[in-house]
Image (cartoon, rainbow, N blue to C red):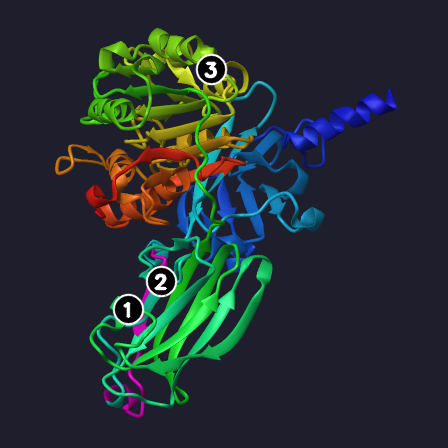
């Protein structure tokens, strides 16, 4: 009996279920004015209403406190990035509120951490048995502007040194060293190169100019050093970067696998002429591995819905374009690709494609699922998320829309292929069903975040079009969703540059999309991806070099 009791208590902790009461029996749960609020103690005592919080370096946050305006609660279910926080949370009651404290440092910090990108925080509170639950949601995101992998600031030296040794107009140039020893301009923050070169050009050679570099790697590794040697432009190792023949100061930095941050100052004596910050992710190089078995795909795009007021413009065109590419250039046999768009993408047809069509896969096969349409949160039970079919009924999502757990069941129990890719151009409108109010954060759509959870098993890659607080944009200029347009450009060859060998791999496509979409949307949309043991060298398309377009 005692053993059974401990098992039940442990299950409650893992599920994030806690009970908190104030002293004295029979005290009724009552709402205080306001709503559930979030506090970030490391940033001060300010409390934040549900919504989007932009915080410098969110990955360094270690504590959160949720203020629940009730004198007593029955149950609370907090989640960080869709995962219950039972192992690191403490709930206690004060005179006029209940506090839910989340401390990531517990258990040596092994279980939870915020990422450098968007993070979701949500809580469901049951005031008393049988009562309607309360919900609140936040997104903790980095500042909007520093999304670029490279930032540069030119400084005016107090002694006029900048005027005497003015750098070239392009500032600090970054080049990656290819496998054959050649250097190529690095135009995005991902590379397979073991080393990068930094160059600064000047009208004349100045011996007192040097590069001061502070390198930071993963798990807190760091070092500071000076570098730099002079060469004439024509003889410089950088080729194109020094083509004008100007004296060039050049230094090199070895990269570790994973994230590398370089804070670089161009120094004239003790005066900084410029400061640059580079965030470079080094991915392990690998040769493309062919798909031994068959390639399967289910491609769904819905612009026209039976429900009123939620139509999209280009989701059907997106699906048709992906379908055509897979068959014409992607090596997919037509009978292995199922296209469902508009009135053909009914609840029943989608389920048939997922649960019957894909049941024919074998372990050596590859499966690609493409979704373009609305991913929404249930209006009556915010714990549930659905992909809307053409004939979905807003008031009956449970019986007419595709629930998130069905997508999980398809991957877990129906598809036998060991390599699964999902591209989701969803969340076109954060309030497609008109849900949520101004004080609970329900206008934030976490559909994509929950979809990425499906990639937490080996051999899966899930890439979504936007972050939790963003919409997936469509433009008349492209006549496509921006995310899908970037997929098509990348597969057509624009992503084949790391290395440019005529093969577009999964890793190259992901890197290209992550750089292209923010550039096309002026920083309004940022794709995200999740993978667990997926072969990022898997070839997705083959292109001819002379026809490759670097858009």
Q: Which residue is mark 2?
A: 182
Q: Position of residue 463 (x, y in %)?
A: 40, 35
Left or right, residue 504 beside residue 545: right
According to the picture, the residue beneath numbered tag 1 turns out to be 239
Q: What is the number of the mark on residue 485? A: none
Q: Are marks 2 and 1 in contact (CB under 8 Å)?
A: yes
Instruction: Tell which tag, 3 or 1, sits nearer the viewer.
Output: 1
Q: Residue furthest bottom?
A: 159
Query: What residue range appears in magenta?
Result: 148-163
- Residue 131 placement (x, y as % from top left): 54, 21
Residue indicated by mark 3: 361
Which comes before the other along the chain, label 3 or label 1? 1
Relative horizontal placement of residue 539, taking residue 94 as reference (left or right)? left
Q: Position of residue 430 (x, y in %)?
A: 32, 33
| SS under mark 1 | helix
Secondary structure beneath label 2: loop
Structural crowding at the residue carrying mark 3, measured as other residues with C-alpha within 10 Å and reported as few (<14), some (14–19) or many (≥20)? many
Pick whichever, 351 or 196, lies toward us.
196
264 versus 2 height, above or below: below
């Amino acid at each position: 009996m005692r053993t059974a009791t401990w098992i039940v208590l442990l299950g409650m902790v893992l599920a994030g279920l806690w009970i908190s009461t104030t002293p004295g029996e029979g005290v009724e749960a009552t709402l205080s004015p306001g709503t559930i609020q979030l506090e970030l103690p490391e940033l001060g005592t300010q409390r934040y209403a549900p919504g989007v919080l932009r915080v410098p370096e969110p990955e360094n946050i270690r504590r959160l406190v949720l203020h629940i305006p009730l004198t007593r609660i029955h149950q609370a279910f907090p989640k960080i990035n869709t995962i219950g926080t039972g192992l690191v949370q403490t709930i206690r009651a004060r005179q006029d509120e209940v506090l839910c404290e989340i401390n990531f440092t517990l258990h040596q910090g092994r279980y939870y951490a915020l990422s450098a990108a968007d993070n979701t925080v949500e809580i469901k509170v049951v005031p008393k048995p049988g009562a309607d639950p309360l919900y609140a949601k936040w997104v903790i995101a980095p500042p909007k502007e520093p999304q670029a992998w490279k930032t540069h600031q030119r400084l005016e030296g107090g002694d006029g040194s900048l005027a005497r040794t003015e750098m070239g107009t392009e500032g600090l140039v970054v080049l990656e060293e290819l496998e054959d020893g050649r250097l190529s301009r690095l135009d995005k923050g991902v590379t397979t190169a073991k080393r990068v070169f930094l160059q600064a050009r000047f009208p004349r050679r100045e011996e007192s100019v040097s590069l001061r570099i502070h390198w930071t790697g993963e798990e807190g590794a760091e070092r500071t050093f000076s570098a730099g040697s002079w060469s004439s432009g024509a003889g410089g190792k950088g080729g194109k970067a020094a083509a004008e023949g100007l004296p060039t100061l050049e230094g090199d930095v070895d990269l570790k696998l994973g994230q590398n941050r370089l804070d670089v100052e161009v120094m004239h004596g003790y005066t900084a002429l410029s400061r640059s910050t580079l965030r470079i992710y080094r991915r392990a190089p690998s040769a493309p591995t062919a798909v031994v078995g068959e390639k399967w795909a289910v491609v769904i795009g819905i612009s026209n819905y039976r429900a009123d007021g939620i139509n999209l413009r280009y989701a059907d065109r997106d699906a048709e374009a992906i379908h055509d590419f897979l068959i014409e250039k992607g090596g997919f046999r037509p009978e292995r690709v199922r296209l469902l768009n508009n009135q053909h993408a009914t609840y029943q047809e989608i389920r048939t494609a997922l649960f019957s069509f894909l049941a024919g896969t074998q372990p050596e096969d590859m499966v690609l699922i493409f979704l373009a349409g609305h991913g929404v949160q249930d209006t009556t039970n915010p714990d549930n998320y659905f992909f809307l079919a053409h004939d979905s009924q807003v008031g009956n999502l449970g019986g007419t829309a595709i629930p998130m757990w069905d997508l999980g069941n398809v991957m877990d129990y129906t598809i036998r292929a060991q390599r699964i890719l999902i591209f989701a151009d969803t969340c076109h409108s954060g309030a497609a069903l008109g849900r949520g109010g101004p004080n609970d954060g329900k206008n934030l759509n976490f559909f994509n975040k929950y979809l990425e959870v499906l990639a937490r098993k080996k051999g899966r890659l899930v890439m979504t079009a936007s972050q939790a607080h963003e919409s997936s944009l469509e433009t008349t200029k492209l006549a496509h969703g921006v995310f899908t347009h970037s997929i098509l450009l990348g597969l057509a060859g624009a992503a084949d540059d790391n290395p440019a060998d005529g093969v577009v791999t999964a890793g190259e496509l992901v890197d290209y999309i992550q750089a292209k979409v923010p550039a096309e949307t002026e920083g309004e949309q940022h794709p995200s991806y999740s993978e667990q043991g997926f072969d990022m060298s898997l070839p997705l398309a083959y292109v001819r070099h002379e026809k490759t377009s670097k858009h």
